[in-house]
């Protein structure tokens, strides 16, 4: 279980770093970020599916929650780099909502179970 945790926690940070280095405007950054998110979930669906199905196990839930929160914060930070372009009066709230909706839709599409 620890090796799986390490595999998932390393994530696609090289892809995120490359995206960050491109310094894209929000209208390009968001779709690119969602592509990275979708590819990560698609590539790891075989690992994530059984973990999400066993989320009632305390150890599994802890690993999943930590990975989800890290993923969420990375996504939000990437969007907030373009905060001046976000028209919502609370950019962080808008970025968090964007992550929540996109993650839930992708997880459901990939048959990963509940993202809650």
Image (cartoon, rainbow, N blue to C red):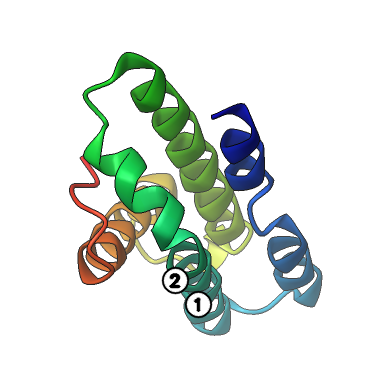
* Residue that numbered label 1 is attached to: 35
- How packed mark 2 is, by other alpha carbons closer than 10 Å (few <14, some 14-19, many 20 or more), is some
Depth order, front residue of 92/77: 77
Residue at x 28%, y 68% (from the top left corner): 110
The image position of residue 31, as x and y in percent, is 48, 80
Question: For residue 55, which numbered disc appears in the image?
Answer: none
Image coords of residue 115 (percent x, y): 24, 46
Residue 29 versus residue 63 in the image, above or below: below
Local secondary structure at mark 2: helix
Camera-side residue of 79 and 6? 6
Tell whether 90 sits left or right of 14.
left
* Residue under the point 61% across and 27% down: 2
Which quadrant is the N terminus positioned in?
top right
- Helix, strand or loop at mark 1: helix
Residue at 44% of width from left, 63% of height from top?
Answer: 41
Q: Are marks 2 and 1 in contact (CB under 8 Å)?
A: yes
Measure the C-alpha gap from mark 2 to mark 1: 5 Å
Q: Is residue 17 visible?
A: yes
Locate residue 69, reporting x and y percent: 46, 36
Position of residue 80 measured from the top left corner of the image (x, y, whole percent) = 56, 54
Q: Would residue 25 appear left or right of 19 to someone viewing this image?
A: left
Q: Which residue of the protein is positioned furthest toward the top in this rendering?
A: 58
Quarter containing the C terminus: top left
| Residue for point 50% across, 77% down | 35
């Amino acid at each position: 279980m620890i090796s799986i945790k390490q595999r998932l926690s390393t994530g696609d940070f090289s892809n995120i770093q490359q995206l960050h280095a491109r310094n894209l405007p929000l209208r390009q950054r968001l779709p690119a970020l969602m592509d990275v998110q979708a590819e990560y979930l698609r590539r790891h669906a075989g690992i994530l599916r059984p973990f999400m199905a066993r989320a009632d196990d305390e150890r599994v839930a802890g690993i999943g929650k930590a990975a989800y929160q890290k993923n969420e914060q990375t996504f939000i930070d990437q969007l907030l780099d373009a905060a001046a372009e976000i028209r919502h009066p609370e950019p962080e709230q808008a970025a968090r909502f964007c992550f929540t909706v996109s993650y839930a839709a992708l997880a459901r599409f990939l048959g990963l179970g509940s993202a809650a």
